[in-house]
Image (cartoon, coloured by chain):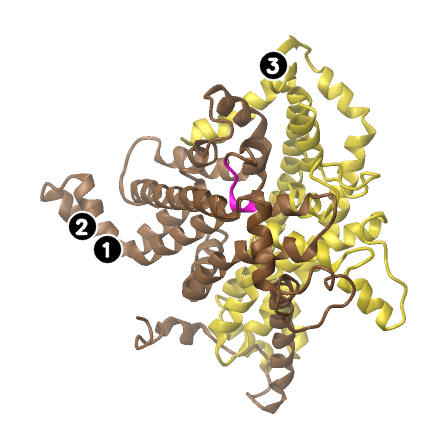
Chain colours: A brown, B yellow
Amino acid sequence: MTVTTPRPAQHRTHRKPDAADSPRGPLRWWVYALLLAVGAASIFPLYWSFVVASSDGADASGLPSLIPGPHLMENLARVVDTVDFWFAVQNSLIVASTVAVANVTLSTFAGFAFAHLRFPGRNTLFLVVLGTAMVPAQLGVVPLYLVVSDLGWYGRLEAVIVPALAGAFGVFWMRQACEQAVDPDLVDAARLDGCSVLRVIWHVVVPAVRPQALVLTMLTFLSAWNDFFWPLIVLDPVRSPTVQVVVSELASGYFTDYALMLTGATLGVLPVLVIFVLLARRIVTGIMHGAGQGVR
Amino acid sequence: MFVVFGLLPLLYTAWVSLHDWDLIDGPRAFTGVDNYAQLLSDWRFYNALGNTVSIFLLSTVVQLLAALGLAALLNRPLRASSWWRAGVLLPNVVSVVAVALVFGQLFGDTSGTVNAVLELIGLDPVDWHSDRWSAHLAVSVMVIWRWTGYNALLYLAAMQSIPQERYDAAALDGASRWQAFWLITVPGIRPTILFTVVISTIGGLQLFTEPQLFDPLGTSGTGGTDRQFQTLVMYLYERGFTEYDAGYAAAVAWAVVAISGIVVLVNFGLVRRMVARS
């Protein structure tokens, strides 16, 4: 897909050697050595998780071998015996996909409105949206719990889906995407021709912001998949667990079984790794251009 | 949607915090500021506050300094630069639950890998869980591992927008690489540094999953037998969702909001002053 496409030229022009840099000479091996060390430190815990997951439960104490053992399948079977893992995977998929799709749709509408439509109170409203991002979500859990249980949603997936359907991050992200990628003249022309806002969004905005929308979809999917605090509070560990909840359940037994715990952890991380490997470059660019711009 | 799920909860939290309010049975009595008065004399609150601040300082200082160094490395002309960037971001996308469990194994007291390595090289094993400072260190390592790369990418983005001429001029004046870094690069990304300080503050004061799952015995939220690594949000969880005291948990929540607000305001003050200066 992107293999034959040349990288955007701006990366090259922005790129420059550090300052009073000695010419691009030999001495740079230590830069790579340091980066390799950082890279190894980034990957090691994941690799280690896999090593322990494939070891015999008894081996996992002390210093197990550095290479994976042959017990992964056994441990997997034990995970499935201990908790309802596949049910949790199904729940997590439902939650994360719904949240991701809803977020991208709503954020595209709101982002377009904030970037290209003029309406009274636009700036104030945008500040309110940003303000909600400054208020740590975890601190609203008490009233959120009371509302959710009044609605009879305790232990149901609605309880984790509905509050996450829209978020300030997505709106901020898509507003920026609309400002950068959508030509305002095209929007004006389309509106003069009598296009409704919906048609403008569908025919002008959506094609232009598709790459950013894809990254946002994946980022919201990941954060919904990884969420732990709120599902722990409001979901029932037996009737409606998500993956993170069952994985943490594996850790709460009386006896600490690392092979079991880390098999669950490894499995729960797999979809994350797949998404990350597929989209890593775009996520990196998105984070660098997205969050950085907010400050400058 | 934003009003419902963003602002309203805080007002509702304030309302709940003024009551003797049971999580299941609902409000029992309006008690005014009683919960807050109790909070001010609650040693467990101060304990959680101290732990949170300690872990926050340990992890933030190391994490941001390391990110600065890492960003400087990534800002050099590298082969396969996008792969290095992706590599350093990897820890940030991994589920916190998995991270906490892996590090829980690594820092295990009797069977952990870190202790096994320490013994191998002839050092004494460390009581990672029972000793307060060791536990803070272990939890901080998880936070540092997760966030250093992310912050490095933010710094890198800011570094790339510093005009090359400044570096050329410095080179003409005979500045060393080290001087150029401190006199040009760091001042050039100051707003981003303060931005990362703000988001690390908000995140650090809300730390929950890492210490919660670091506790090998269950999910009661006490953070070790002597509460040696219980953070503020863990205390909120313990009071609100294991003891069902919604009123008190709401008061804890507001205390955290207030503390975050103060720290963030101080940061904004710093931003304004630094922007004015440059």
Question: Tag 3: residue type?
Answer: Asp
Nearer the viewer's eye, disc 1 or disc 3?
Answer: 3
Which residue has dot 2 on it?
Answer: A203
Apparent side of residue B260 relative to residue A110 in the rendered image (left or right)? right
Up the image or down, B32 lies above or below A187; here it is above
Which element is circle 1 on? helix
Which residue has dot 3 on it?
Answer: B25
Which residue has dot 1 on it?
Answer: A207
- Badge 3 and badge 2 both on one subunit: no
Determine which quarter of the picture holds residue A267.
Answer: bottom right
- Badge 1 and badge 3 both on one subunit: no
- Tell me where the magenta segment starts and ends, as one range: A240-244
Apparent side of residue A59 relative to residue A230 in the rendered image (left or right)? right
Which element is circle 3 on? loop
Question: Tag 2: residue type?
Answer: His
Distance between the alpha carbons at the discs numbered 3 and 2: 52 Å
Distance between the alpha carbons at the discs numbered 1 and 3: 51 Å
The residue nearer to you, when weighing B191 against A234, is A234
Chain bearing mark 2? A
Question: Tag 1: residue type?
Answer: Pro
Main SS of residues in magenta = loop
Badges 2 and 1: C-beta atoms under 8 Å apart?
A: yes
Nearer the viewer's eye, disc 3 or disc 2?
Answer: 3
Q: Which mark is residue A93?
A: none
Chain bearing mark 3? B
Apparent side of residue A128 relative to residue B237 in the rendered image (left or right)? left
Coordinates of residue A137 in the picture (x, y in percent): 55, 36
Residue A147 part of the magenta-drawn span: no
